[in-house]
Image (tube, rainbow, N blue to C red):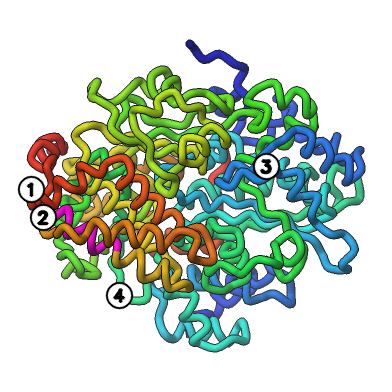
Amino acid sequence: MSLWFEPRLTRDWDDPSMIGLDGYVAKGGYEALSKALAMTDADIVDVVKSSGLRGRGGAGFPAGMKWGFVPRDTGKPTYVVANFDESEPGTCNNRELVERDPHRLLEGMAIAALAIGCETAYLYVRGEYLWQSMVLERAIAQAYAAGHLGPDVQGSGKRVDVVLHRGAGAYICGEETALLNSLEGFRGQPRLRPPFPAVEGLFASPTVINNVETLMNVPDILVRGAEWFRELGTEKSPGTKMVTVSGKVERPGNFEVPLGTSFRIVLEELAGGVLGGRALKAWTPGGSSTPMLTAEHLDVGLDYESLAEAGSMLGTAAIMVMDDTDCVVDCATRMVRFYAHESCGKCTPCREGSWWATRVLERLEDGQGQAPDLPIMRDLGTNLMFRAFCALADGTASVINSSLQHFPDEYEAHVRLGGCPLKVEHLEEVPA
Amino acid sequence: MVFEGPLRADADSILARYPEDHRRSAVMPLLYLAQSVEGSVTREALREIGALLQITTAEVEAVASFYTMYRLRPTGTHVISVCTNLACKLRGAEAVFEAAHEATGVAHGAELSDDGLFTVHEEECLGVCDFAPAVQINFCSHDTVSPERMRELVAGLRAGEVPSPARGPAFDSFKAASRALAGLEEVPSA
């Protein structure tokens, strides 16, 4: 089986002029915005609904439905917020999309703004993406100067302003309600839902929050139509998805594939196979918060449904590949340590559980583990899952549960041998 | 005073980005602005930001202490951030992190080197998993950094050189990068 399709989000990646307004306009840029200006708000929402575009940031919620939830009769302003906080470990495709094609994001944001009657859209960029935020600042200035943004968008009399806001190093701010708190000048801690942001979001007003890749799909949907969008992907997961492949592969990178493409094709044809021809041991399909899978799952399709059936999630489609020299306990320790560091501290199970799990994993890896540590890990996994405000704790639990499920022998070997069975071999593999 | 003269004008331009009745949103860029002047966020800056936004110093500190990119303690001229999260770890990041400590002379658990030049920070995912191990120096990206390359980068910084990042312009100090993070740096044309 081989992979051929007409690329969408990446079709102009070879053209460096796309970083500027002229290059983007030469390829038909901002025509979708003109089309949207000639449509009613409801028609814009309808075409995005019919396309079946689902949120690309992790949850997979249908974007058109999200837009349709926004009440228009509250007397308050409405807001669009673009989530460019991309922080899920292993994920960097939004970064490259913006580096190569920043105006497509701005056009998608402007169309979303028109769809919900929003005059001010916020663009939340993680602080570490300093250069990418500057690329966007430049693109925003160009779009204003050309009249695609500002008080009179393309002469329509409609106003759409875009305000860029930088984060400052907090994974949790990718969670949409934590992001709103951060944007309002508070600690980035999640809010209780309901009320959902569509009803009470930024500044207690109706708000749509979309991921960068989601918004960047919108201009094409307006110009080419919902049916065109559905020509690739699966019935329930239409369109393409950017995947990031990292870890032990020959060619790490960001690749666009139709949803439903098997992991085997991505690994073997796009990423060049496992590094050095070694054996695949484990992989995360959607970043470290999605349950890890194994070599038995090579033919699973990368889409929302197939991955759920395999016991995991599409997440951000960030594939981190571990080979047979990598210790699963060691990798799980690093991932769980991340969640312990990034827990915002609001909910006890997450704040205490991730810290405790890190300690237990560290002592297992260091050879200090005891037989009761394995039931402790199982217990922690159970008590972290679905026990907190947001999904951060579920991410911690997913690492624990999936690694225990697929590699129980490796955990037991750490206790039995009083240390990591792979350590000697592993150390030899680390580059000098 | 931190925000006086031209800095007061910078602070006002930051405040003007947000709706008049939601000025508190400016707290994050104002913290970056303060950091760009003093190399870290001082107590005086926390107080002044509180006064500007009409919130308490404690509320400002609550925000500043939540995010890792604000430094509340003395910080080196250069901040070296090494990602050791899984994608980078699988490509040898731990050895790069060690090399950063050795080359800069920053002890594990210490905030900065004795000469005040360097702060080394263990970073969670920097979003450059395609070029692991990922490193940032003053928030400028350096791709696929080996321990040897890390030693070269540190030696260059000691010699007063500004290493060219993998993408975008170079910032010659943590202060300069903080000013760009406040959104006050001219963006070079495409």
Quadrant (top left/top right/bottom left/bottom right) for the C terminus of chain A: top left
Give, as a single range, the part of the protein colored magenta.
Answer: A357-367
Question: Element type at marker 3?
Answer: helix
Residue A24 or residue A279, whichever sits in front: A279
Identify the disc placed on residue A417.
1
Which of the two discs, 2 and 1, sits closer to the camera?
Answer: 1
Distance from disc 1 to disc 3, alpha carbons, whole Å, reads 51 Å
Q: Chain of mark 2?
A: A
Q: Which residue is mark 3?
A: A215
Look at the image and say whether residue B105 sits in the magenta stretch. Answer: no
Q: Are marks 3 and 2 on the same chain?
A: yes
Q: Amino acid at mark 1?
A: Leu
Task: Kindly report which numbered mark, 2 or 4, lies closer to the viewer in this rendering.
Answer: 2
Mark 2 crowd level (few <14, some 14–19, many ≥20, 10 Å Cα)? some
Earlier residue among tags 3 and 2: 3
- Which one is earlier in the sequence, the residue at label 1 or at label 3? 3
User: Which of label 1 and label 4 is nearer to you?
Assistant: 1
Can you identify the residue that label 4 sits on?
B74
Residue density around tag 3, few if under 14, some if 14–19, many if 20 or more, within 10 Å: many
For the point 22% across and 32% down, which residue is it?
A324
Residue occupying the far top of the picture: A1
